[in-house]
Amino acid sequence: MKFRNTVIVAALLATGLAAQAQVVVVVNPKSALASMTADQVSSIFLGKTTTLPSGATAAPVDQAESAAVREQFYSKVTGKQSAQVKAAWSRLVFSGKGTPPKELGNSAEVKKFVAGNADAIGYIEKSALDGSVKAVLTVD
């Protein structure tokens, strides 16, 4: 009985850990940026600024609205839930003060876009990180 309970607890913990995988914010590998703070990233993805710390105009890309990585990214980096972010962007768009990040389907599409655009910034699961992009922030 003890063994069975241990297995159940281990399985539940593993499921919880998988759901909370690390997220990395990525930029083009040729970017001069070595790192960014959560506040800098948050400002770009919430439309408070349109520039990267390097001074270049940022080209942010989002994951699909249904993606778990998107909810985790916004929760950890901005402290907001997806619905709050969507509402904030609706106000900015309505007032003519901004355009939300381009939405892509998954981490592979985000990596492809960022790798092909010098000023792009996006986020992916850390497990998807490879040499085609450069991580500037890791979010636990």
Image (cartoon, rainbow, N blue to C red):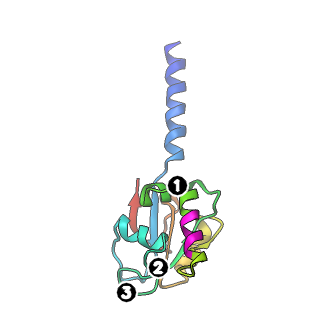
Q: In this view, does 58 lie above or below 18?
A: below
Instruction: Name the residue: 47% across, 79% down.
Output: 28
Image coordinates for residue 83, horizontal then vertical, percent: 58, 57
Find residue 116 and report its image quarter. Answer: bottom right
First in sequence, mark 3 or 1: give its number.
Answer: 3
Q: Position of residue 54 (x, y in %)?
A: 35, 84
- Our reading of the magenta stretch's main secondary structure is helix
Depth check, front residue: 72 or 126: 72
Q: What residue type is labelled 3?
A: Gly
Instruction: Pinpoint residue 47: horizontal percent, then vertical percent.
Output: 48, 74
User: Does dot 3 land on a helix, a strand or a loop?
Assistant: loop
Sequence-wise first label, 1 or 2:
2
Above-or-below relation of 21 to 1? below
Q: Is mark 1 on a helix, strand or loop?
A: loop
Q: Disc 3 and disc 1: Cα gap in Å?
A: 28 Å
Do tag 1 and tag 2 residues touch (Cβ < 8 Å)?
Answer: no
Nearest the camera: 125 or 39? 39
Q: In this view, does 32 lie to the left or right of 123?
A: left
Report the residue marked by disc 1: 81
- The residue mark sitting in front, 3 or 1, is 1
Question: Which mark is first along the chain, 3 or 2?
Answer: 2
Query: What residue type is disc 2 on?
Result: Asn
Q: What element carries label 2?
A: loop
Q: Is residue 91 left or right of residue 56?
A: right
Residue tagged by mark 3?
A: 55
Residue placed under numbered mark 2 in the picture: 28
Mark pair 2, 3: CA separation:
15 Å
Q: Which of marks 2 and 3 is in front?
A: 3
**Residue at x 44%, y 74% (from the top left corner):** 48
The region drawn magenta spans 87-92
